[in-house]
Image (tube, grey):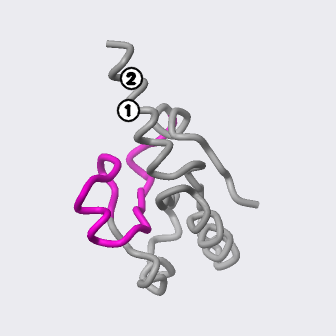
Amino acid sequence: MINRINICDYIKQHNSNDILIDLRSKEMYDYGTIENAVNIPMDNISELYELPKEKRICLFCQAGDYSAEIAELLSDAGLEVCDLAGGYREYMRYRLMQNEQL
């Protein structure tokens, strides 16, 4: 079973042992991403299987659909995986809400 968490919970719970992976294309990643995210586009899925098993892998894509599917595959391969529900879109909503509260 995959741990799906929303962006607010991820920001509160993440630690230095997590690896945050942006599954979007390099072009989208270059346009903007979540702080400390590493870009491994979905086209390079084989690289994901090489990530360290002792770390939690947190995945996101644009809206959360593809990352959920890939999280299932990686979990089946023995990796500890979480999926950021709503993806980068949800992160941008979170950021907008934070700015409005200032």
Q: Which residue is mark 2?
A: 98
Q: Residue at x 40, y 62 (%)?
A: 22
Q: Quadrant of residue 24?
A: bottom left
Residue found 51% across the figure and 64% down from its top = 54
Above or below for 35 versus 13: below
Q: Are marks 1 and 2 in contact (CB under 8 Å)?
A: yes
Span shown in magenta? 13-38
In this view, the residue in front, 87 or 49, is: 87
Question: Which residue reaches farthest left?
Answer: 30
Residue appearing at x 59%, y 61% in the figure: 81
Nearer to the camera, 92 or 73: 92
Which corner quadrant holds the N terminus? bottom right
Q: Position of residue 61 (x, y in %)?
A: 48, 61
- Residue 15 falls inside the magenta stretch: yes
The type of residue carrying mark 2 is Gln
Residue located at (46% from left, 71% from top): 52
Circle 1 sits on which residue? 95
- Tell me the amino acid under the disc marked 1: Arg
The number of numbered discs placed on residues in the rendered structure image is 2
Q: Position of residue 68 (x, y in %)?
A: 63, 63
Q: Quick one: SS at disc 1?
A: helix
Q: Quadrant of the C terminus?
A: top left
Q: Mark 2 Cα within 10 Å, few/some/many (few <14, many 20+)? A: few
Q: Secondary structure at mark 2?
A: helix
Is 28 above or below relative to 34? Answer: below
Q: Is residue 28 left or right of residue 23?
A: left
On the image, the x and y values in percent for residue 51 come to 44, 74
Marks 1 and 2, how far apart at CA: 5 Å
